[in-house]
Amino acid sequence: MSSHAHSAHAAEAPKGFIGKYIFSKDHKVIGIQYYLLALTAVVVGIILSVLMRFHLVWPNAHLPLVSGGLMTPEQYLALVTMHGTIMVFFVLTTAPQGGFGNYFLPIQIGAPDMAFPTLNMLSFWVTFLAFVAIIAAFVVPGGAPISGWTGYAPLSGIGEVTGPGEGWGQTMWIISISLFCLASLLGALNFIATLIDMRAPGMTLMRMPLTCWGWFVTAILGLLAFGILLAGGILLLLDRSAGTSFFAPAGLVINDQVQNHSGGSPLLWQHLFWFFGHPEVYIAILPGMGVASHVLSTFARKPVYGYRAMAMAICGIGFLGFMVWGHHMFVSGMSPYSGFAFSVLTMSIGVPSAIKTFNWLGTLWGAKIQFKSPMLYALGFVSLFVSGGLSGLFLAQPAVDNRLHATYYVPAHFHLVMGVAAIFGIFAATAFWFPKMFGRMMSEPLGKLHFWLTFAGTYCIFMPMHYAGIGGAIRRYADPSAVAYLAKFQPLHMFMTIAAFVTAAAQLIFIFNFFWSLKFGAKAEKNPWNATTLEWDTDSPPPHDNFHGQFPSVYRGPYEFGVPDAKEDFIPQWVEPVKVARVK
Amino acid sequence: MRTRKRNRGSAVPAAMLALLLVILVVVTVYYFTVDTYAIPPAITAVGAAVDHQYNLTLYVTGTVFILSQLGLALAVFKFRDRGQRVTFTRGNNTLEVLWTSATIILFLGLGFLGRKAWADVRFTDASASAIPIEVTTNQFVFNFRYAGPDGKFGRLDPKLISASTGNPLGLDPDDPTGKDDIVVPTLTVPINRQIQLLLRSQDVIHNFYVRELRLQQDAVPGMTIPIHFTAEKIGQYEIVCTQLCGLGHSRMHSYLNVVSDADYEAFLKQQAAGQ
Amino acid sequence: MAPTTVTDVIDLTTPRKGGGGGASFGGGDGDEGSSAPGSSAVPQRTYITGMTVGLGGILMFFMALVSAYIVGKGMPNSGWQPLDVPRILWLNTLIIVASSFTLARSRRCFRADNESGFRYWWGWTTALGIFFLAGQIIAWRQLVGAGIFLTTNPSSSFFYVFTAAHGLHLLGGVLALLSVAFRPTHRLTRGTATEVVAMYWHFMDGLWVFLFLLLLLGR
């Protein structure tokens, strides 16, 4: 259907199993590799969280394979740390961007591959190494670190004396994160260069699918943020192994021993970490927002409401995302005046997020909604993002943060936005693009069942968690028995744990559906959803160069659904204007 | 034409999703309203101001929550595929400007309204007549130091810290001003007097939090961080550590005892006598 | 009836606004393309974009170190003892600044199709880069000889971290210079290769001058 054939040398696809599937430079293979890595990581992460929830309600239950039978506080804290680290980095930063972004950005802009395929391959394998390193933290002497995914110094910056897992475990954590930073920086570079320079004729920025806008701004955030974490990680490693004192002040006394450090600032670690950490959470959600807009429009058969505003909102969220990191530090000892400034900026970031929500509702209003499973996940995303985003408004205000900081309110908020909404973005993308990636349809009944159970289940886990926080229940507590007032939250914890078990079990449906459909799903055509963007113009799965040498040109925006005088209810981007069938 | 076909298949998922969203709203609002796990009332005026700001935020976000989720439910049900034509539109710039402005005013307004509750504690120093009490945290205990009758805190030396031999703070025996310092594991304060806490840490970052004060602050090694409060209700309140500090994090707690003036004087006398 | 969209119609005769400039990209992934320059699937200017973007990421890394330095220096009770920068750093700075001039000269020769001139000045740039690195190592040895190690003082910690981080990046630059001199490029034209390496080199030069001034003024 395209009209812009290029003069070309023929595409030379790699031969041999290793070249095709292991050390492949094809962005599609790399995208699937990232996705499978994220799938592995999420299974590990869920197991860790199930163990955590189990311990919170049955702390005295004897566990097999645990020496002594009972989970110790340091084991619980190791679960907390590793669950957070693995989920944030190896699931939420990997699947949406490394997985789907890698696979579909080039195709959606009409390019044969990423700008730098070798670099792309390198990025994946360094990420893989990073994953190996973080898993290694479980088995090194001393076990996994216990300082949380945030790794605050000096707990993380002195060494084994501060606690179990703070020796080799913390070192592996730093190595893993540093490798991840390197891989992400290279990946971000690739995305940005590809998007700027390799768009097909006619693909102006304002005709890009919102998925591409999501990946674009996410890549910019990654480029600017991961270098900061890398620097911080190197300094932390030096503090621990070389005896420097970037984050350690003088006079630290642990077990009555004065530590040999001087001149450092624990707050410096927090500033460096959160300067990265806050953009990181927008890295986790922006691709999902792009996917949500894309899927909502496709299955509502109506253009995205306010496309330009949506693109600007993505940019606005990205831009403001660099200015709000201090809202993690209101009670840290940072200047309270800075705190208030950060608060104002944080409340402001609610504005582009609200714009997106209004526009999603606007897309649905007057639409013709088809409830296929991608759409269900996208609708779920909107609901979950609203819930989680609104609870952020409480935490954005330092006065209220006095009450809610480090209570269960905080994980309630970030799980709803990251641990559920962003995950629903991944589910939606999977259901939507599976036919294109693998040439087969996923099972609709299984997809729907998985959606209902997960949507209800995750709300059952994380909405009640707010109540615990409002009442003053403290997070990261391995054992509530020492503090009398925590006992009354146990029924709430029991409810959340049961909900967590059921929801975790329901994920088996998704995993089964994924692998079963690979083999037995109905064969997919080129464009099973009657969608408009360039990936639907090529084979399912696409050939090595994405377009069999016939690269498309783009004639219109990405969401031409329900155009009044068109015969079909959608006009794809690649169809020449003269060829669009019109109603007389 | 493809778009004209009647699609009854969408009624069930549309209804289910709309119903789930309605249930979400009803159950969430219910539990926020009955507040089963309510926090105990604040015992300071600033604490009450914090609660006021919290409630205001709850009303605002609650309204937005209800409207958005129900709006989503309505849209999803009303505009399910029944074979209709879509109402084609690319958007409406006026509407964009309107709801963006409304959101800016609402969110920023809310933020600025919350300034005072923050400023009253954090932008304002403790008054000169406040009682200074030093809070020293370490893995995994709180220690509280009163300056004693001379009103001066004695010098501390990290090298002298020895919890096992009864010198958890490392008080320097050569400093005479430290001789009358009172070091205790719980915090006793008189009612209606401003208290200035000087937060310190010996090892890693800890935190001092009393729910009823609606006040918490990290204790950072290498820093002495002041906060202040005036308790208005006698009672015993839990002090907890909220900053992950190691394996004993959840065991690290103490008590705030707010007592009458008379009882406070008695406490000080008793401690002095025991020295 | 709703108005038809303006974006429906595109004049295919106007120069395309969306795609990249340079060579049209064909059906290959470029990896196994011929060694003829400019035959890549990727437009040449993409490599310039890539380098620009990459330098942005590197800049943020160094800015994190710099802000850590500023915070550390300004902390009360930090025991910060200002460091006397080894005198050889003045010479090193001169060397690296000179290397930017030789690099610019080299590229002028390249553009003028002066192959021998290009090689001559490119070679000098590489040599100056190596001299710079050697000079940095000498500076370290001088500090160690004076009893100033990585952990001696926060100021010395930053000194070593700055110089090591910059030095490592500069080593990468030296390897790139050598690579362009000796290895034929497949995907990049030689012009593009020299341009991106030059961008990197000048950036590292400028970065060093900045770090050097920071360390000087920090005394």
Image: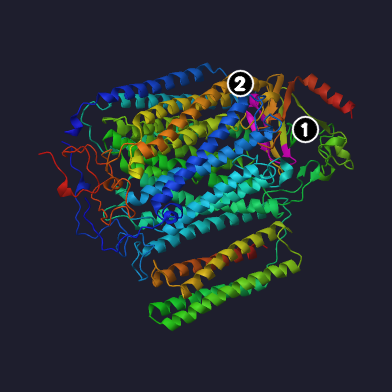
Element marked by disc 2 = helix
User: Within the magenta stretch, is there residue B215?
Assistant: yes
> What are the residue bounds of the magenta stretch?
B199-218
Element marked by disc 1 = strand
Left or right of A75: which side holds A177?
left
Q: Position of residue B77 (x, y in %)?
A: 31, 24
Q: Nearer the viewer, residue C98 or C10?
A: C10
Q: Position of residue B12 (x, y in %)?
A: 31, 22
Residue at left 42%, top 80%? C109
Quadrant for residue A298, please give it: top left
The answer to whether residue B227 is visible is no
Q: Nearer the viewer, residue A233 or B122?
A: A233
Q: Residues within 10 Å of mark 1 (few under 14, many from 20)?
A: some
Image height of A201 relative to C86, above or below: above
Q: Amino acid at mark 1?
A: Asn
Q: Position of residue C137 (x, y in %)?
A: 66, 70
Q: Which residue is mark 2?
A: A490
